[in-house]
Amino acid sequence: MIITKGNLRAAGFVLAVVAVSACTPMTRFHGFAPDARELAQVQVGQSTRAEVIALFGPPTSDAGLRGDTIYYVSSQFDRIGPFAPREVDRTVLAVSFDANDRVTNLVRYTLEDGQVVALDRRVTDDGIADVGVLSQLLGSFGRIDAGALLGANDTEL
């Protein structure tokens, strides 16, 4: 193949297009949190848990066993090129209820608030200890059967 000035320009153009497109942020959205217009439908002291869930759908979390607060969470992540995704926006809506399942409080937290909200984690323990490959290899040395290793046969009398 002969390298010409035109071929170099075309290759440079393709390389520039690839470089620019690699730097374009890719945005992902996770979860759902109702906006202010949707929240206007919820009346503190009057709306029930069932009405809130009917309006917004099932919550992201229900605060574990207590059950007096449900959470709706939405997040936005941007990823540029080969770098790890970075969270650029988060909204947590906490809806609290009284003993009669009536709304007592609506609180919205954002990423800028820096509030830690302990959501329940639905993680099942697999019962497997965290054993690395090296630990597995070293642990198997005591279980080697010398007879099987040397090819001895148990049928001899």
Image (spheres, rainbow, N blue to C red):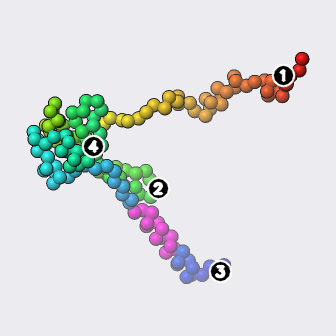
Q: Is residue 13 magenta?
A: yes
Q: Quadrant of the C terminus?
A: top right
Amino acid type at mark 1: Asp
| Mark pair 4, 1: CA separation | 65 Å
Q: Secondary structure at mark 1?
A: loop
Is the residue under label 2 in contact with that under label 3 (CB below 8 Å)? no
Q: Secondary structure at mark 3?
A: loop
Specify the farthest residue to the top.
157
In the picture of the structure, the residue carrying the numbered disc 3 is 2
Which sits earlier in the primary sequence, circle 4 or circle 1?
4
* Circle 2 crowding by C-alpha within 10 Å: few under 14, some 14–19, many from 20: few
User: Can residue 108 be spotted in the picture?
Assistant: no
Q: What's the residue at 24%, 33% (across, down)? A: 67
Residue closest to the eye, 156 or 79: 156
Amino acid type at mark 3: Ile
Residue closest to the eye, 156 or 25: 156
Q: Is residue 17 magenta?
A: yes
Amino acid type at mark 2: Pro
Side of 47 where 33 appears, left or right:
right
In the picture of the structure, the residue carrying the numbered disc 4 is 59
In the picture of the structure, the residue carrying the numbered disc 2 is 82
Q: What's the residue at 67%, 27% (across, down)? A: 140
Is the residue under label 1 in contact with that under label 4 (CB below 8 Å)? no
Q: What's the residue at 62%, 30% (across, down)? A: 136
